[in-house]
Amino acid sequence: MDFAFLYETLLTLLPGIPLTLKLAASAVGLGAVLALGLALMRVSKIGPLSAFVKTYVFFFRSTPLLVQIFLIYYGLGQFVGIRQSILWPILREPYWCAVIALTLNTAAYSSEIIRGGLQSVSAGQVEAGLACGMTRLQLLRRIVLPLALRQALPAYGSEIILMIKATALASIITLLEITGLAAKLISETYRAFEVFVVAAAIYLLINFVVTRLIQLLEYRLTPHLRPAPHAALVKQGGVA
């Protein structure tokens, strides 16, 4: 193993980290907003809205993300109406096409995660809120959404990590994030193993940090699951 080359490779790939994080943060942030709206539509009693969300989720969960990126980046430009529309300055840019594809994809998965969280809120808690005189909006904001977030966070954390890894596909449409820089370096050096080892290590470190942040947030949102100080002392034999 050529450690000098590994160090040079690390220095070459580090500039791709900001773009990787920017893609992931944009997709996760926009996708979360879209997913919440889709989840609320899905659990509503309005048939057409629920049917639309089912179709949307089925399409984006049943087709490869790479195909979705190609459809947006290469496919939409074939239509004259789109090239002449006000959306074309956005849709002709690789970055925004990648963000749109990642956002639409993660929204489909996240909406199902949020829907599961919403449906995990017991009817008794909803009825208690209504009995206290809360409006539907207050009930949603004060009881349903906080409880749903707490239930959905572990699965949603996994979706965030998947999105960080999915940003590697953006290199296919010329974006020089971590994987894009790695592919460029391989074409110049023909040393794929060392380059991808360093790239994998960078993704591993990023996801390690993200995982710990999600665990910290989960810990803060679940104080009722922590052992009481007295119980911990008893368990350790500190109290007779």
Image (cartoon, rainbow, N blue to C red):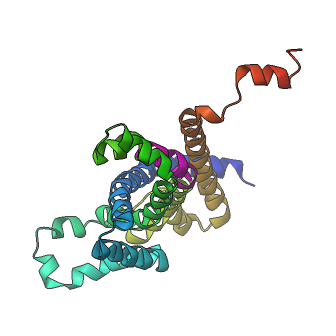
Location of residue 129 with respect to 232 vertically, above or below: below
Magenta part of the chain: 145-157
Q: Nearer the viewer, residue 38 or 213?
A: 38
State the count of labels: 0
Instruction: Report whether residue 12 is seen.
Output: no
> Residue 15 at what x, y percent from top left?
45, 48
- On screen, residue 82 versus residue 172, left or right, reads left
Residue placed at 31% from the left, 38% from the top? 133
Q: Main secondary structure of the magenta part?
A: helix
Q: Residue 100 or 202: which is nearer the viewer?
A: 100
Residue 56, x across and y down, in percent: 37, 75
**Picture coordinates of residue 36, whole percent (x, y):** 36, 56
Query: Which residue is at 42% across, 59% downward?
Result: 176
> Along the line of sight, which residue is nearer the eye, 58 or 189?
58
The quarter of the rendered structure image containing the N terminus is: bottom right
Above or below residue 64? Residue 234 is above
| Left-right relation of 120 to 40 | right
Quarter of the figure that contains the C terminus: top right
Q: Residue furthest front?
A: 131
User: Is residue 179 in view from this perspective?
Assistant: yes
Q: Is residue 202 magenta?
A: no
Which residue is at the front of the view, 232 or 203? 232
Q: Against 219, is 192 above or below?
A: below
What residue is shown at x 42% (from left), y 73% (from top)? 57
Give percent across and percent down for residue 29. 37, 51
Q: Residue at x 49, y 48 (%)?
A: 124
Relative side of 25 to 80, left or right: right
Left or right, 232 with reference to 93: right
